Image (cartoon, rainbow, N blue to C red):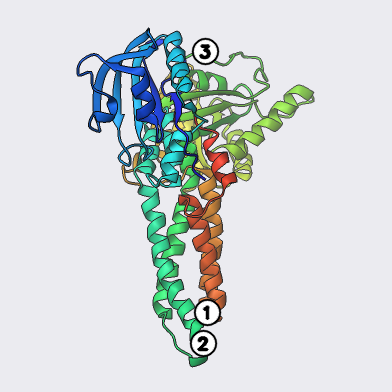
């Protein structure tokens, strides 16, 4: 599966900058670099230099000097890819970067494919597949929480959990298959009591990992928050207050917002994706009706729902709207936002609090979006409901859809093992279900993989990584 050719690519972001880095990896990396690099200090060839060293000199094409550079030298197997690697730090002019690439390819290297350096690291056993995928997530992370999650996975936190599960299952399947070899003698090598205990523990852990996907996906792509409510209750004003800019049009005319307005804000290292939706009301306007349908669609997609109520309205009207929204949501967090608190009065707030009973997944806040009053308290509730504050550095959170799907299948297989142990089914059926669980866990780390899966994963990487 591993192409033995020597590959090269620009590893830094495209365009012009102060400096740029080019990578060369493969069996002939140092040999090719020796042809194009002339040391200005020692005069020695790179092949005579020690590993993990830096050298100053010039990149040349025959008699032409292309640039003064710093060369970093890494020797197999102690490198990112497990191969010989040469990294060239040059000046960041686009022309210089392209000329160095040309001279490297002229002397035997070829252009790297997207993600090929990381793919070689995986194929050479420098990291497993889940760690390789975390490299891409780390590069793409733009918030502190996404960075922390990707870094933990890249350092092997998730892999250790999966490897531990597989190791325990492998021991028992070996014992069960040994029993099958001696089936005529009615010998039991695998302690069924221990297997029951183990499978229950594994089921709980796999279920916990799979259930963490909703949070992990939200932290990776931004926590989706839908702002809903009737027309003219202050939804757009609230969005503007949260974003601290005039993103949405604010008007006293009912039905101003007819489509979903989306924007992202970074709150203390976590991205929140806010959707300002069309006001919910009875209407014959076809365009507004489409907007209201999209409002209900965003309710299903959201992790957190902000139901904005107008405190100048009768309490009975507000509670009716609350009940209708409660019917539309299931596992989402709901924050009831009493807006226009400056005009609603304390008595109206007390009356509303007396008429509603908050469920476990519900909170309430009273604000004035127009005056910016109590917005910080609302933001605190958002952070709390997102679950970010409870994350520790070593928490294992699943954020990859491929991992989630594999965990779901593994969970189904281990549930069949548990049922089989309860009904005392034969060892060959138990072994089959354990093998299936092992298969899906192995898919996550790459112990079981295919060219199609690898191609799909690494094609999404940037060239040079």
Q: In front: mark 3 or mark 1?
A: 1
**Left or right placement of residue 136 versus residue 46 in this view:** right
Q: Residue at x 37, y 38 (%)?
A: 83
> To which residue does mark 2 refer?
183
> To which residue does mark 1 refer?
427
**Left or right placement of residue 377 versus residue 256 in this view:** left
Q: In front: mark 3 or mark 2?
A: 2
The spot of residue 449 in percent (x, y) is: 53, 51
Q: Taking the image as drawn, is residue 308 in sight?
A: yes
Circle 1/circle 2 CB separation < 8 Å: yes
Viewer-nearest residue: 401 or 232 = 401
The spot of residue 219 in percent (x, y) is: 45, 36
The relative height of residue 444 versus residue 265 in the rendered view (above or below) is below
Categorize mark 2 by other alpha carbons within 10 Å: few (<14), some (14-19), many (20+).
few
Q: Residue at x 41, y 40 (%)?
A: 121
Categorize mark 1 by other alpha carbons within 10 Å: few (<14), some (14-19), many (20+).
many
> How many numbered marks, from 0 up?
3
Quadrant where the C terminus sits is top left
């Amino acid at each position: 599966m591993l192409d033995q050719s020597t590959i090269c690519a620009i590893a830094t972001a495209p365009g012009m900058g102060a400096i740029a880095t080019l990578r060369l990896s493969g069996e002939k990396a140092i040999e090719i670099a020796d042809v194009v690099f002339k040391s200005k200090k020692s005069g020695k060839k790179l092949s005579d230099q020690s590993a993990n060293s830096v050298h100053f000199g010039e990149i040349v094409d025959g008699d032409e000097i292309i640039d003064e550079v710093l060369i970093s030298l890494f020797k197999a197997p102690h490198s990112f890819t497990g191969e010989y690697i040469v990294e060239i730090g040059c000046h960041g002019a686009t022309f210089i970067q392209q000329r160095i690439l040309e001279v490297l390819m002229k002397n035997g290297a070829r252009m790297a494919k997207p993600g090929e350096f990381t793919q070689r690291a995986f194929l050479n056993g420098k990291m497993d597949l889940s760690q390789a995928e975390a490299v891409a997530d780390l590069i793409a992370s733009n918030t502190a929480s996404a960075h922390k999650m990707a870094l933990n996975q890249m350092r092997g936190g998730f892999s250790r959990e999966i490897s531990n599960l597989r190791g325990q299952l492998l021991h028992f399947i070996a014992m069960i298959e040994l029993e099958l070899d001696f089936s005529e003698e009615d010998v039991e090598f695998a302690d069924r009591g221990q297997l029951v205990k183990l499978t229950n523990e594994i089921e709980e852990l796999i279920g916990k990992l799979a259930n963490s996907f909703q949070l992990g996906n939200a932290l990776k792509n931004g926590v989706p928050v839908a702002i809903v409510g009737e027309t003219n209750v202050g939804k757009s004003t609230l969005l503007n207050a949260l974003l601290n800019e005039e993103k949405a049009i604010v008007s006293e005319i009912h039905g101003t917002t007819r489509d979903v307005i989306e924007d992202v804000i970074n709150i203390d290292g976590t991205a929140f994706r806010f959707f300002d939706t069309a006001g919910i009301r009875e209407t014959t306007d076809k365009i507004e009706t489409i907007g209201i349908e999209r409002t209900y669609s965003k309710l299903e997609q959201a992790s957190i729902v902000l139901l904005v109520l107008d405190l100048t309205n009768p309490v009975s009207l507000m509670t009716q709207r609350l009940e209708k929204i409660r019917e539309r949501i299931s596992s989402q967090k709901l924050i009831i936002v009493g807006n226009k608190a400056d005009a609603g009065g304390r008595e109206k707030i007390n009356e509303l609090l007396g008429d509603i009973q908050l469920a476990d997944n519900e909170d309430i806040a009273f604000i004035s979006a127009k005056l910016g009053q109590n917005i910080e308290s609302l933001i605190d509730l958002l952070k709390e409901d997102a679950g970010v504050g409870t994350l520790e550095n070593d928490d294992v959170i699943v954020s990859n859809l491929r991992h989630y799907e594999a965990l779901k299948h593994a969970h189904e297989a281990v549930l069949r093992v548990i049922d089989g142990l309860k009904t005392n089914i034969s060892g060959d059926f138990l072994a089959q279900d354990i093998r299936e669980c092992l298969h899906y866990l192995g898919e996550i780390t790459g112990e079981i993989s295919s060219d199609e899966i690898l191609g799909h994963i690494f094609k999404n990487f940037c060239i040079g990584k």
